[in-house]
Image (cartoon, coloured by chain):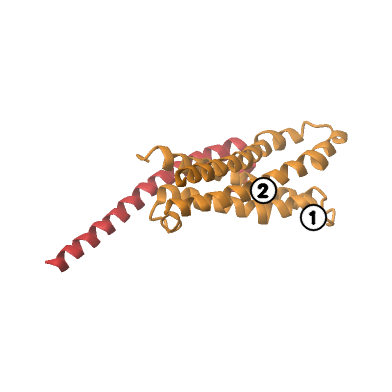
Amino acid sequence: MSKILQSLPLTIVAGIVLTIIMVIATHQLENMNQSGVEKTMSDLQKKMN
Amino acid sequence: MEDFLLFFVRYLHVLCGVMWIGILWYFNFVQIPSMSKIPDDQKPAISKVIAPEALFWFRWGAAGTVLFGLILAYMNGYIHEAFTLQRPDIGFGMWMGLIMAFNVWFIIWPAQKIALGLVEADASAKPAAGRRAMLFSRTNTLLSIPMLFSMISAQNATGF
């Protein structure tokens, strides 16, 4: 890791890679969160029925 | 009035953020790569005058950015969702910003005080402190890329 940080170009490349990982993780988490909400709404509907 | 207050806090958040990240990038893109090219007799101009002044605005810029950012998130009603990553679009950026501010105040600034001779320390401790400050400053440069992406995309590009 320190080898990457000692080089400015490698630091920038690592920052771009981390950005891509963050975008993917954001999509995954949003999908998981949405699934949770949908599950709660479904549970509520079952209780109402 | 509430809209104006929201705008004004965001304005202060961005203003402090530009101060902070601007100086972070000055250190990493300009000062650190140039130090080896400066003659030894001229180096004190950087280490004794410019760097301490830049570090003052750097750390207070970081503090202001975090303070106004947290107020903004509270006013917008998403502070809890962001911290718990129920809103990961802004949450990742917020966490990275907090880690970066922690690095500034509790690692980079104490290390720089030793490296620049602003506090009493053994001469042997200076190179290690300088290296520690440089590596954490680079870590912040690395984190600034996704952090800014998160901050700007959460505000402007809802597709991300």
**Can you tell which mark lies on residue B125?**
1
Q: Position of B96 compared to B22: left or right?
A: left
Q: Position of A30 compared to B109: left or right?
A: left
Marks 2/1: CA–CA distance: 26 Å
| Chain in red colour | A
Tell me the subunit letter for badge 1.
B
Residue at x-position 66% and y-position 39%: B23
Q: Nearer the viewer, mark 2 or mark 1?
A: 2
- Does dot 1 land on a helix, a strand or a loop? helix
| Chain in orange colour | B
- Does dot 2 land on a helix, a strand or a loop? helix
**Disc 1 residue crowd, few under 14, some 14–19, many 20+, Cα 10 Å:** few
**Disc 2 residue crowd, few under 14, some 14–19, many 20+, Cα 10 Å:** some
Q: Quadrant of residue A7?
A: top right
Residue at x-position 42% and y-position 54%: B77
Residue at x-position 11% and y-position 66%: A49
Q: Is B156 rendered above or below residue B78?
A: above
Amino acid type assigned to the residue bearing label 2 in the image? Trp
* Residue lying furthest left: A49
Q: Quadrant of residue B45?
A: top right
Give B17 or B105, whichever is nearer the viewer. Answer: B17
- In x, y percent, where is residue B50? 78, 38
- In x, y percent, where is residue B140? 60, 46
* Residue lying furthest front: B1
Residue topped by disc 2? B60
Q: Position of B130 compared to B2: left or right?
A: right
- In x, y percent, where is residue B33? 70, 34
